[in-house]
């Protein structure tokens, strides 16, 4: 016997399943956007394409996982903003700190980062170097590390670019600059009027692994695929080495 109410319920159930399948399909087929900054030799643009040592590792993970992706090289603050806010996004060359460790799903290490003190002509003594005025770039891992540093017997300058930090150093407005060596090399490359001999690398400030990290609210099944793929690649590398 035909029951219009039952038929209506079946129709609603059928439409709900269609909508659910549509959302599931669109989520699985979505292109991930992976953010990195201009950070040679690990990530930079060449002929409009993202290249570099870290870029190669990121590409291998996503391609082995058979997941569509796009890599955008943008300023670090923008990369962090989108990776924190947008689903199906990732960020690489990021160091894990107590301030950000809960914000992401952390996958494989892309490379290690060595952050040094940089001085003009001569560095302060080791016993004094953590007390003198220092400059570094805001919205970077250095800024995160400095927030964690309990030693406050110094004046700190958070600047919008590494160029400003090194210019303050050469004008003797600060005694040291904190940056990875690759950033120093980039500064020297883009400022040919600077005498490289006048900038001295001081002691190591911090060494840490840099990761590929996923937005924690991204597609769960794809996140698990990426995690297992990164583990397989890591084990393969260890076996080769």
Image: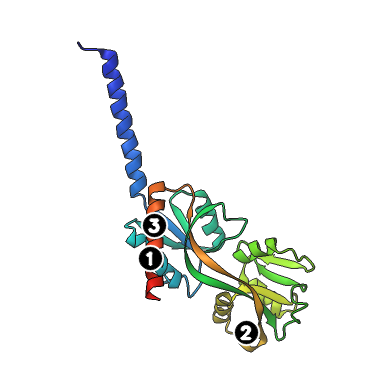
Residue beneath disc 2:
194
Q: Residue furthest front?
A: 239
Nearest the viewer among 203 and 71 is 203
Left or right of 166? Residue 219 is: left
Q: Is residue 179 left or right of 236 when viewed as pictured?
A: right
* Mark 2–mark 3 CB contact (< 8 Å): no
**Does 70 sit above or below residue 195?**
above
Instruction: Say few, some or many: other residues with alpha carbon within 10 Å of mark 2 (under 14 / 14 to 19 / 20 or more).
Output: some
Furthest residue toward left: 1
Q: Which residue does the numbered mark 3 point to in the structure image?
A: 228
What residue did someone put label 1 on? 233
Which image quadrant for residue 125?
Answer: bottom right
Residue at (70, 86) in percent of width and height: 121
| Sequence order check, earlier mark of 2 and 1 | 2
Label 1 residue SS? helix
The front one of 103 and 160 is 103
Q: Sequence-wise, which precedes: disc 2 or disc 3?
A: 2
């Amino acid at each position: 016997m035909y029951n219009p109410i039952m038929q209506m319920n079946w129709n609603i159930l059928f439409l709900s399943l269609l909508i659910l399948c549509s959302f599931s399909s669109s989520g699985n087929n979505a292109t991930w956007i992976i953010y990195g900054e201009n950070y040679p030799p690990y990530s930079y643009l060449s002929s409009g394409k993202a290249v570099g040592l870290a870029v190669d590792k990121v590409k291998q993970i996503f391609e082995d996982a058979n997941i569509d992706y796009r890599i955008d090289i943008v300023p670090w603050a923008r990369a962090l903003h989108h990776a924190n806010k947008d689903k199906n996004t990732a960020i690489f060359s990021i160091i894990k700190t107590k301030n950000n460790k809960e914000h992401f799903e952390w996958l494989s290490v892309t490379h290690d980062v060595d952050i040094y003190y940089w001085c003009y002509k001569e560095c302060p003594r080791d016993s004094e170097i953590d007390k003198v005025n220092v400059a570094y770039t805001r919205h970077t891992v250095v800024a995160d590390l400095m927030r964690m540093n309990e030693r406050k017997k110094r004046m700190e300058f958070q600047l919008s670019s590494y160029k400003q930090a090194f210019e303050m150093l050469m004008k003797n407005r600060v005694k040291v600059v904190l940056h990875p060596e690759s950033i120093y090399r980039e500064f020297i490359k883009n400022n040919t009027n600077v005498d490289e001999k006048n900038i001295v690398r001081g002691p190591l400030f911090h060494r840490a692994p840099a990761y590929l990290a996923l937005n924690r609210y991204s597609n769960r099944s794809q996140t698990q695929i990426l995690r297992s793929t990164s583990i397989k690649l890591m084990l393969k590398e260890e076996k080769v080495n």
